[in-house]
Image (cartoon, grey):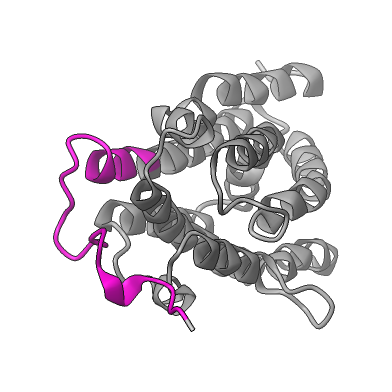
Amino acid sequence: MTQSHADFEARLRQIGAERYHDKHPFHDLLHGGRCTPDQVRAWVINRYYYQHSIPMKDAAFMSRVEDSKLRRIWRSRIEDHDGTDSNEGGIRRWLRLAEAVGLDPDYVASTEGVLPATKFAVDAYVRYVRDKSLLEAVAASLTELFAPKIHKDRIAGLLKNYDFADDRSLSYFRNRLKEAPKDVAFGLQWVLDHADTQEKQDAAAGALIFKTDVLWSQLDALYAAYVTPARIPPGAWIPGDQTTLAKVS
């Protein structure tokens, strides 16, 4: 039976309440100030792979959209990450964070040293958006519904517990608090309007579950490699590698 907009939205929000990655133990360590400097660096390196792939995901989506109005609205997501003449963009802000934690931003931007599981999960998300229905592609983006809380917790936790944290190094998260609400308001309404059968609602809910799995699996890989059992796979970043650290002038 097709759910009402209100009931279907509640169903989507319940997915976040149960499955969003704010509940992962790595975030407890990070926000609580219990990560070592190298664990923070590993997080920055691996999360960058996700950040830099988001515009490619959105470009893949837009290449399939025939509705010019939808393309025009969606375009701002790419600009928010890649930047414009008047907005440096989220990718540049993330590389500033990388430099603040002591990494060479050119090394981070190269995506060398990213965990294989991180690449696998993020690349799977890009393929999902490219290959699945437009409804599922938009629904997968609705993890943004749950992001404001984790950004607020992260800003507060990092400022309280880490010397590198200041307004400049955390500008990515502060900007997402302003950028994400417009994206998620549009995306949520679009999904509610277009998921007009039980089959489509089930598909949209499945897409959101898939995306929470993508986010969670990235942290599982990070935790296993750099926290416990601290088994770093071949090719991934090795703490202490001086060639990957920020150059001191």
Specify whether residue 34 is painted magenta: no
Please say whether residue 53 is visible from this viewpoint. no
Span colored in magenta:
219-248
Q: Position of residue 246 (x, y in %)?
A: 43, 73
Please say whether residue 148 is visible from this viewpoint. yes
Comparing 139 with 49, the one in front is 49
Magenta residues: mostly which secondary structure?
loop
Comparing 200 with 119, the one in front is 119
- Identified at 25% across, 68% down, the residue is 241
Residue 40, above or below 29 = below
Q: Position of residue 123 (x, y in %)?
A: 39, 60
Q: Position of residue 78 (x, y in %)?
A: 69, 68
- Identified at 77% across, 78% down, the residue is 84
**Left or right for 144, reference 231:** right
**Left or right for 79, reference 201:** right
Q: Position of residue 185 (x, y in %)?
A: 82, 41
Give the quadrant of the N terminus.
top right
Comparing 234 with 122, the one in front is 234
Q: For residue 59, which quarter of the picture?
A: bottom right
